[in-house]
Image (cartoon, rainbow, N blue to C red):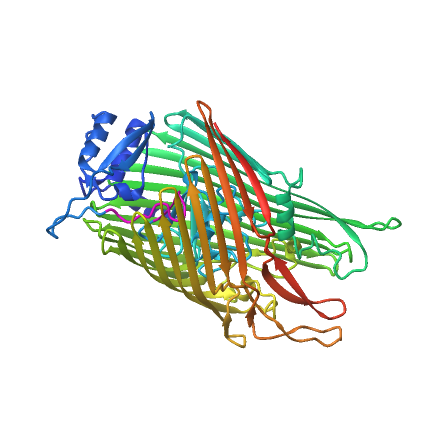
Amino acid sequence: MIRKYKLFSLLLLFSAMSFSQQLPLKTILLIIEQQHQVKFNYTDDAIAPYSFLKPETKFSLAEKLNYIEKQTNLYFEHINPTYITISIKKNILPRPVFDEMQPIHLTEVTIDNYITSGISKKSDGSYIVKLNKMGLLPGLSETDILQTMQQIPGIFSSDETISNINIRGGTHDQNFFLWNGIRLFQTGHFFGLISAFNPNLKNNVLISKNGTSAFYGESVSGLVAISSDLSSEGKYNSGWSSNLISSEFHSTIKWSPKSRFQYSIRRSLTDLFHSPTYSKYYDRIFQNTAVTTTNENSSVNYSTDEKFYFYDFSALLEQNIGDKHLLKTAFIAINNSLSLKQSTNDLINPISENSRLSQQQLGTSITWQTIWNPNNTSKFELYGSNYNLNAVNESIVNEQVLNQRNAALETGIRLENQHQLSSNLTLNTGYQYNEIGVRNNDEINIPVFSRKIKEVLRMHALVLETKWNSANKRMGFRSGIRSNYVEEFKKFILEPRFNAFYRISESIQLGVLAEQKSQNISQIIDLKNDFLGIEKRRWLLANNDNHPVQQSRQIEFNLTFNNKSWLLTFENFYKKVTGILSQSQAFQNQLEFLKINGDYTVYGTELLIQRNFKHFHTWINYSWNQNRYHFSDFIPHTFTSNYEIKQSISFAAMYELEQIRFAIGTKWFTGKPETTPLKTPSSNSNSTITYNSPNNTNVNDYVQTNFSASYRWKIKKVGEITTHFSILNLFNRKNIINRYYRLDTAQNIETVNTYSLGRTPNFSLQIKF
């Protein structure tokens, strides 16, 4: 602990230093916000080119804004007394440059309205999603962030769930999910069909596929970081919405210019009534699980009565302390609950058993931010995250009772300091400590069996990162290194990160991204029937032996062309992940019960073409990749990954006016790999299925067309009302999203298919006031 306090003291001392009088405009705006209790709304690309002396403190707010307007190509618009938007003056064209030594004031490329309004792509290859500004997407009746991100090339879910999002060939647990600094082990409701994040809050979402900042660790694939900012909210802002699955209410209260509070609560309606939407979701998520397969392989008739519901709750508090300090606290709770009663249809000797499953995520964070001076800011964050998955499976067939629990608890601290060395160069330093504990319990009465496993890992990380942009903003880079130390293994892991861009012209940009990352926790599947066969994955910690630390390396080269009418992005990448477990890959063939280590290598191309008109825009994206496993302890050593989607194409067209919006789109991708049986087993009791080589073929291609529409009414002095209507799988295509094989009671091979959602309508009503 002494070493930690010394490091923290050095960071504080370092943060008190100042090297430059000229300040980035972003820093100047932060100072004005604190001095005058206002909030600016802007895009980073609009303010990025400007650095100059800050206006004098004695100036009024109007005088300071006038001073900035004279220094820039920007203008300010007061939305209300405390909310000010910043826009670029459209009538002023950039000055032609005749001398290459003169500065070319090119802004950093940020692509707005990427796919739809509210999504931007930054020069570093990451994506920013502003949920309160999101446009309509095909098939969505609400702004579901985890469904929305699947429109981005290279991100998809082959089984339609948001609990199985694959980013460039990785598994869902290899992604890092953050909500206001809290790591989330659970991200969905309805066991993966609905995002666990309230769609009506003004959250900003950072999504990264590569070139991630060194301040983010503990993942070998993608990043999804959700953050909330209440300073732009009015004095009182509330809303209510409901659809055919759930209902929610949220409210933001500004107690004073320095105090803001927000809370939201959402609860499903599924235990109160069964809508057509619920029926479709039920058929999709519970097929081939204990909920729907009781009668299989049995001559006895059973009846099943299930009760399912979910809820989520979040609360945030922001408190300005003086002119330099900001305190933030956040809390989130996510819950899924299922109770299952199964009974025999026997009037003489009825038998009844009760099974249940609950999945819960709790998290909290406290953040202290300080602007020491115009060049130095620091942040201290304390957080905790607790996940629990509990199931009791009472079999009505053989009176077996199985109790299972999987729990993960993570606590940690983060220290971060940002120092503006000059108008073009920023140095960021930090220290992070986290402790992760995982518990796995299993108890069976017939035969008697008990297993209790508890593991703990403690990790330290030092972070150093620099960001530089040329004076003319034609090129820039971010480079960093993350040094991890795992106490239990006495192991250092270095993770370099790099991200650079070069602007050939106003419309064309080249980029290169590279990163190394590591991960100490992953999800595995012991048996496909664990946890009622519904949420069968459990978290497990690395042990540096038969469960090694996962590590990844990735590099990408990209090209972007963007003008007023056209957008083209072209990305080529190579990625390798080592230390994976066969149990984490959801095998349902000859590898299902093996426990071996390996790696996977994936490379591919991602292309997006978008055409914009006044009220109409359309886009098409295409992805191709090759994803291969390598297991040295299995023959063949190399074969196709379970998560390879060789080719995929998505198309969408959207029409937007002020009040009415329409969106229609189609997506197609090659079918998921499957392993076919080689021959029929013999008729003895020890029969097993003999398979061909793993993933020797694919199921049929997946095709789905989706539609959405919305209409908005503005009510004077009250607020607005918005209605949404959507249809998933408009043409009711029966897509196979998974296939495996098993033996029936007669020892014959049985094919088990999992089908996609059928035609699924939904309707929502939203009121803001």
* Residue 89: x %, y % from top left: 24, 37
Question: Which segment did they paint magenta?
Answer: 107-121
Is residue 576 placed above or below 75 in the rendered structure? below
Q: Residue furthest right?
A: 348
Is residue 646 placed above or below 300 in the rendered structure? below
Residue 323 at least partly seen = no
Q: Nearer the viewer, residue 620 or 117?
A: 620
Q: Nearer the viewer, residue 654 or 366?
A: 654
Q: Residue furthest top?
A: 717
* Residue 521: x %, y % from top left: 49, 57
Which residue is drawn at the image coordinates 45% and 47% (left, top)? 178
Residue 51 at least partly seen = yes
In magenta segment, residue 119: yes
In magenta segment, residue 247: no
On screen, residue 259 versus residue 452, left or right, reads left
Q: Considering the whole magenta stretch, tell me its main secondary structure.
A: loop
* Residue 623: x %, y % from top left: 43, 61
* Residue 207: x %, y % from top left: 41, 50
On screen, residue 688 versus residue 477, left or right, reads right
